[in-house]
Image: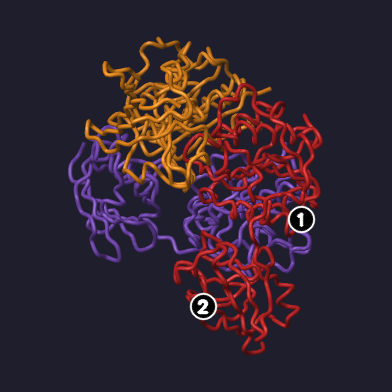
Chain colours: A red, B purple, C orange
Amino acid sequence: MKAALVLQTDFGLCDGAVSAMYGVALSVDPNLHIYDLTHEIPQYMIWDASYRLLQTIRYWAKGTVFVSVVDPGVGTNRLSVVAKTASGHYIVTPDNGSLTHIQEEIGVVALRQIDETVNRLPNSGDSYTFHGRDVYAYAGARLASGLISFEEVGPELDVNQLIRLPIHQAEVADNGEIIGSIDILDVRFGNLWTNLDRSMLFDLGFTYGDKVLVTIASNRSVVYQNMLTLRHSFAETACGDALLFINSLDKLGVAMNQGSFAHAYHISGGATWQIRLKKIKEN
Amino acid sequence: MKAALVLQTDFGLCDGAVSAMYGVALSVDPNLHIYDLTHEIPQYMIWDASYRLLQTIRYWAKGTVFVSVVDPGVGTNRLSVVAKTASGHYIVTPDNGSLTHIQEEIGVVALRQIDETVNRLPNSGDSYTFHGRDVYAYAGARLASGLISFEEVGPELDVNQLIRLPIHQAEVADNGEIIGSIDILDVRFGNLWTNLDRSMLFDLGFTYGDKVLVTIASNRSVVYQNMLTLRHSFAETACGDALLFINSLDKLGVAMNQGSFAHAYHISGGATWQIRLKKIKEN
Amino acid sequence: MKAALVLQTDFGLCDGAVSAMYGVALSVDPNLHIYDLTHEIPQYMIWDASYRLLQTIRYWAKGTVFVSVVDPGVGTNRLSVVAKTASGHYIVTPDNGSLTHIQEEIGVVALRQIDETVNRLPNSGDSYTFHGRDVYAYAGARLASGLISFEEVGPELDVNQLIRLPIHQAEVADNGEIIGSIDILDVRFGNLWTNLDRSMLFDLGFTYGDKVLVTIASNRSVVYQNMLTLRHSFAETACGDALLFINSLDKLGVAMNQGSFAHAYHISGGATWQIRLKKIKEN
């Protein structure tokens, strides 16, 4: 059984870029099974690419080879690598921070630099702007098809030298407030996804039905402050009501049932966005 | 030969949700063939999901397993079901109206409730917000791969208890006007798709070349009234001209050649939109 | 080994049209491998469809069957054809100009008209508006699966009678300026892709590091004129700086590092857009 090849980029699907990557991978092995993670990562947003890998990797079989290309540094001396994760997956990517969440929450157990003298599309040496096609799809396909082993990717690197984006850790303040960050949006539905784990919240005594004072701030300016209830599901609230919920990654989310919380309050995700919780009333 | 698995959701493709569904299905059987219907159903629009199933199902082989997840009631006690259609297909879906058009125009011959004690992703019991991944993709993959039979989905239900959205039937008024509804848009091209069958219109004496007085109303307010000609094809009219045509589902459509009729007149689809036809002149 | 089937349309992915094409192709052969080029060709833009075929075809294995459906003339007497390219690929398409770039840069060595008495979806004869499903997907699947040979597509046509869109050739003016056209945008990133080949530019003495006076005009009105440097990669410039580069098709591009050159200066692609280069200073 060959491993599946799963592609992620910020290229979008409106031109032929992703299709060229498919063609290159299938030219390595026409029987490869190729799938998409997403190609709608916002342009150059390495953070989002890193997060989407974490969101999906555990649902794919061990041995699956991910290719993740959000690559503003293409053509510079940033490294091209393949990481082996503690979960038994492989990720082919430029070393620019796209492994941040995987390394933090799952672990990277080994790292290889792609040897482009063998693992690069033949006769593509004059192309400096599309390594997604010429290097990453090609090398990923060779690994997924079994043409090369992980060791044959290229020379070993120290996993501790991987580029990492800064991650805020959740914490409990002296006044009892829980302080977290809004890591990313569930873009389509306008929900906020925080870095606060269900297990942490439940260990601190939270439970479904609790009323919580929620404060959301951007660069320390408060943009939202209100009481919300922690719900099992959206449908427990009236249509249009805001709520707290545990999302599909077992982290705290903030939503508006059948509306968009993010649009309603002009809230986005990323390093500048903070969420604070204070439990007011028991269930 | 395994059956194909065809996925439809309102999740969009900009994050990892659909990819997680693929991963779960392939973890059931890595040799499954998985395809997409669409993932761009407008958020929570069960009507559209129901319609898109009708639009495509007849073009897929018998035995194909569809998974359709537009699920505003996730986490409530709405049922999770698998329907067997008169056409020999299976549809895995929350029972919330998404089988309306299939039941109306094709027929549902048997219905089973998904037994989540066996047909749910192991260790996913604490997730209340993503049954598309944890229940529907998993159960659909088990059925498509042949791991379970239709009977092993779970207990039988009465097909007459399926939730159905209200459907307007086409009718002929006393003054001879034909009254129908605008079921949905061909979104990308801005065409209106009505519920008026070609066979009904032709039985009533309509034919290509006929000039027809077309009245379009929303909540009884007329928003468009003009003479249009029933054409074989868009290209029979001048670029920019409006026309009547028979669409790819053999129903009457209203279009503007290389323009958008829907945008031009601010027309949408759904229960409040009515179309009336009066034939003025023979071909 | 069967050939891959690769689909391109202007249908978008928000309804069931592309899925119906997949279903039809798989009804011909359930083991076909079907992939997408793109379905986001702007509506009716035959030029873009032609260009995207050129962008991707060389990355797919010989024998691959492309189906390209941008078809404003559906239902008229425009021909339905299959072209065999000098590169050993097949393209199934309406004859309306969508083979322009392939014929110009790669070559069409043989052409057949689709015989719809055999190579059309059975019982689809009353549908005049969706030949993508009824003719092109069906005929393409028959060819890719090996059910028919290229000769069995239908009667031979003269390749010189193919409809071609007008293409501007790059030229060198008397004053030494190089005059080219902006063929298309890299839409997602806002880069301009010109028709100026790297080999032509380098033969004329250009090299990386050169400073070039770039003039961009629409219908002879200058909309941009400034000095730009020819770079190996985007990352050699400051974030936000404009640059010249060689794109992934070995043609000259104009970009703004992590910005959108096209949005910044309201520039688009196509027949009315001209670019002129004058080298000012050696590297």
> What number of labels is visible?
2
Residue at 49 percent of width and 27 percent of height: C249
Numbered disc 2: secondary structure: loop
If the image is split into quadrants, where does the C terminus of chain C sit? top left
> Of the numbered discs in the image, which one, if any, rests on residue B245?
none
Question: Is any atom of residue C131 visible in this view?
Answer: no
Say above or below: C63 vs B32. Answer: above
The answer to which image quadrant residue B11 occupies is: bottom right
Say above or below: A29 vs B103. Answer: above
If the image is split into quadrants, where does the N terminus of chain C sit? top right
Residue at mark 2: chain: A
Q: Amino acid at mark 1?
A: Glu
Relative horizontal placement of residue A270, taking residue B180 as reference (left or right): right
Numbered disc 1: secondary structure: helix
Relative horizontal placement of residue B173, taking residue B93 as reference (left or right): left
Front: mark 1 or 2: 2
Residue sitting at the far front: C282
- Residue receiving disc 1: B152
Q: Amino acid at mark 2?
A: Ala
Q: Residues within 10 Å of mark 2 (few under 14, many from 20)?
A: few
Residue sitting at the far bottom: A281
Residue at 39 percent of width and 59 percent of height: B270
- Residue receiving disc 2: A238
Picture coordinates of residue B157, whole percent (x, y): 67, 63
